[in-house]
Image (cartoon, rainbow, N blue to C red):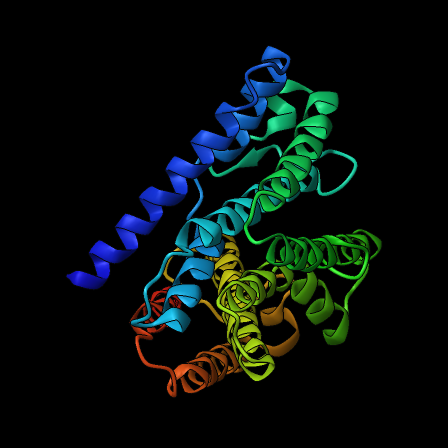
Amino acid sequence: MLLQKYIESRLDMIETSLKEYLGTQSALNKQLKQAMHYAVFSGGKRWRPLLLLSIYEMLMGMRKNTGLPQALKAATAVELIHNASLVHDDLPMIMNRTERRNQPAVHIKFGNATAILTGDALYTLAFEVLGQISPPSKALSCIRILSNSTSSYGLIGGQVVALESKHKVMKMNTLHYIDLKKVGSLLEASADMACTLASADDSVHIIMKSYASNLGMAYQMIEDITTDYNRSVEDLDFGEEFITPTSRNSYTGLLGFDKTRTTVENLLSEAEDLIKPFPHNEALREFVQMIQERIP
């Protein structure tokens, strides 16, 4: 019960912070402002900012925690970046998705040009928020971390490889690279910024980034299991049992369902082992459990 209250209170903090920073954009063109709000507040689990706050507060432990407002700025920034990447990802010239979170994608509702500018505006707002972190040395460190994670070596690099591989049969190393960059980069950045703001040792940075990466890869594999399972069920005649995956460019298509499930279980088990030495790790164990519960 206490853990649930903690999670709910932090999610409320994240929502309030997002509303406050997006509210500062009052001088913007009306349509752009509406599109930014639509992109950010059309759903989403807020896992990345919640993970950042959870790691930060775990590392701070019982010390007097006066730095939470600074961590909240980093959490807000990473969520703005995440939503910006989704707006761009959905565009017709990239992944050509017409829906996001069961609603029309931003480019469908507002047009392609506004969608491009909406993503750009969310990206720049994220770094404006990071620049307000105190002390300035921590702000610069967080800016470096988040810019690296979204660069051609990070999220954008993963997107480019995904585009190049869109109509090809992928190899495992290509699929792993794409998901490590598109899914894992912002999770790792969240962990890295949390460690930076908590003044953690380098060894802790490595552990927390590995933990976050494991969560991201496990989550993506579960998405593949669920997606391929649903496709296969739809393709079967009534009464038949589900046997084989339908998508070759997925973990289930390359590994099969049983091996993919086993890999997910191993990733989550390793994630739990990584955080065992840390006191006050209840929220991080809850992340592992939430993902485990998604396994079909």
Q: Residue at x 41, y 81 (%)?
A: 275
Where on the picture, by quarter, is residue 228? bottom right
In the displayed structure, would residue 17 be above or below residue 242? above
Return the residue nearer the eye: 224 or 137.
137
Residue at 53% x, 66% y: name it. 191
Specify whether 187 is left or right of 63: right
Task: Please identify the quarter of the rendering in which residue 151 is found.
Answer: bottom right
- Residue 249 visible to an observer of this rendering: no
Residue furthest to the left in view is 1
Coordinates of residue 111 in the picture (x, y in percent): 68, 20
Say which residue appears at 61% left-offset and 45% top-offset.
81
Q: Nearer the viewer, residue 140 or 47?
A: 140
Image: 89 above or below 155 = above
Question: In which quarter of the view is residue 295 placed?
Answer: bottom left
Q: Position of residue 132 (x, y in %)?
A: 57, 43
Residue 24 appears at what percent x and percent y?
Answer: 53, 24
* Residue 197 image offset from top left, x and y in percent: 52, 62
Q: Is residue 286 left or right of residue 269?
A: left
User: What residue do we see at 55% from left, 80% from top?
Assistant: 201
Q: Return the residue found at the far right.
A: 164
Q: Is residue 291 something one can see in this rendering?
A: yes
Relative horizontal placement of residue 281, taking residue 157 as reference (left or right): left
Report the side of 69 relative to 150 (left or right).
left
Q: Nearer the viewer, residue 145 or 92?
A: 145
Q: How many numbered marks does the figure carry?
A: 0
Seen as rendered, the residue at the extreme top is 30
Residue 53 versus residue 257: which sits nearer the camera? 53
